[in-house]
Each structure stands twice: as C-alpha cells, then as structure tokens.
Amino acid sequence: MKNIVVLISGNGSNLQAIIDACEQKKINGTLRAVFSNKADAFGLERAREADIPAHALSASQFSSREAFDRELMQEIDAYAPDLVVLAGYMRILSPEFVAHYQGRLLNIHPSLLPKYPGLNTHRQVLDNGDEEHGTSVHFVTEQLDGGPVILQAKVPVFAGDSEEDITDRVQHQEHAIYPLVISWFIEGRLDMRDGAAWLDDVQLPAQGYAADE
Ligand code: GRF
C-alpha cells in the first residue's frame, strides 16, 4: 500500500473526501497522517475521528520559514510518503520543501488556472463578472499555483450568485476530482516529467485532462 500524507490549514472538507475515498477503496492507498499549521483546524478533528494521526505545528515556534519547513519535512518523512497532498494548506512553501517532494506533491486551487493564482479567487470571479469558474488539481512547483495542471472542473456562475454560492459549487467539484487524481497517482498512472503532467504516458495539455478542444 502506498502512503499518503495530507497538509491542511482549515475546515478540511477536501481531506474528508480523501478519507472517504480511502475507506471506500476508491483510493488504494493509506492515509498515514495529517498535518496542520493551525492547531484549531477542524480538519484535525476529522483526521482523529478517522483514527489518522493528526499533528499541528505552529509557525510562531520557528525562527524562519525554512526552519518550519525543515521540521515539517522531517515529521512528514517519518511516514515515508509516496504522495504529499495539500488540501487547503494556506502557507507558502520554501523552495527546499518543494524540491524535496517534487513530483509527489499535489495541490488543489479554486480557480481555472492559469486564471487567478493566489488568494480570493471567488471574489475576483464575481467582481469580473465571469460566467465560468472552477477548480484545478496540479503538481506543485516553485511557482505559486503555477505547476502543471492535471485536472480541472468547471462550474457556471449565475446572475445573483453570492461568494458562498460559488464557493459551495466549486467545493462540490473539488470533492470529486481530488480523490480521483489521487487515485491515478497511487495507481502509478500519473507523473510529472519535463515540466508537464503525464497520465498513462500521455502528456496532458495545459488545462489538464479533459481540456476543451
Ligand atoms: C479549497 O477550496 C481549496 O481549493 C483551497 O482551499 C479550500 C480548502 O477547503 N486550496 P477545505 O479546507 O478542504 O474545506
């Protein structure tokens, strides 16, 4: 069984979808541990509820980002992860961390990348009057929200939608596509090479699998 470690900072609804997919054997791997940079993250409760070791590390106890990430790497590596999954982990990663897990580090970002990297994506979609929004699962590289996209899901934006409406719509899709991509990786079907994502040895286009023509 391959080992998965998940990093969170908050609610952990994506973590829950991954826990459920593991329990239902949709992901054929073991969720070995969950780490949070926030001790009060609800996702830690979800992990404990599922009998998964749950750890919190506070940035205030470290002198630098590098020192924090070094400790985090050591603690993660104790679980010998084949895959490290960022699921709402709201902390910039040091280059050393990214390099250490390169090729086995995934993130989910709530926009149709390369549109809207960074924060407040839902707000920007509404402010710009976009008719379409979505979410992207991608490999993590040093470029913030800039690594090769593996899979996106699109959602419509309706007149009168609130930020909460579109957040819910996007999250609903996230809970479907993140476990799916993780299952591909765990089955050995997915990897990152030459700065691109590959599924079943086919290089995926810039918008990932199932991109529009
Ligand atoms: C998700 O919408 C994800 O795209 C973003 O942060 C949010 C985390 O939500 N990176 P949750 O903690 O999984 O509920």
Image (tube, rainbow, N blue to C red):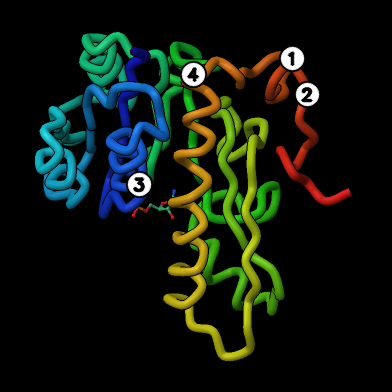
Task: Identify the residue position indicated by label 4 in the image.
Answer: 104
* Label 3 Cα neighbours within 10 Å, binned few <14 / some 14-19 / many ≥20: some
For mark 4, give the secondary structure. loop
Q: Identify residue type, mark 4.
A: Arg
Which of discs 2 and 3 lies nearer the camera? The answer is 3
Which of discs 4 and 3 lies nearer the camera? The answer is 3
Task: Identify the residue position indicated by label 3 in the image.
Answer: 17
For mark 1, give the secondary structure. loop
Task: Identify the residue position indicated by label 1 in the image.
Answer: 194
| Depth order, front residue of 28/73 | 28
CA gap between label 2 and label 3 equals 27 Å
Q: Earlier in the sequence, mark 2 or mark 1?
A: 1
Q: Which mark is residue 46?
A: none
Q: Earlier in the sequence, mark 4 or mark 1?
A: 4
Q: Earlier in the sequence, mark 4 or mark 3?
A: 3
Q: Identify residue type, mark 1.
A: Asp
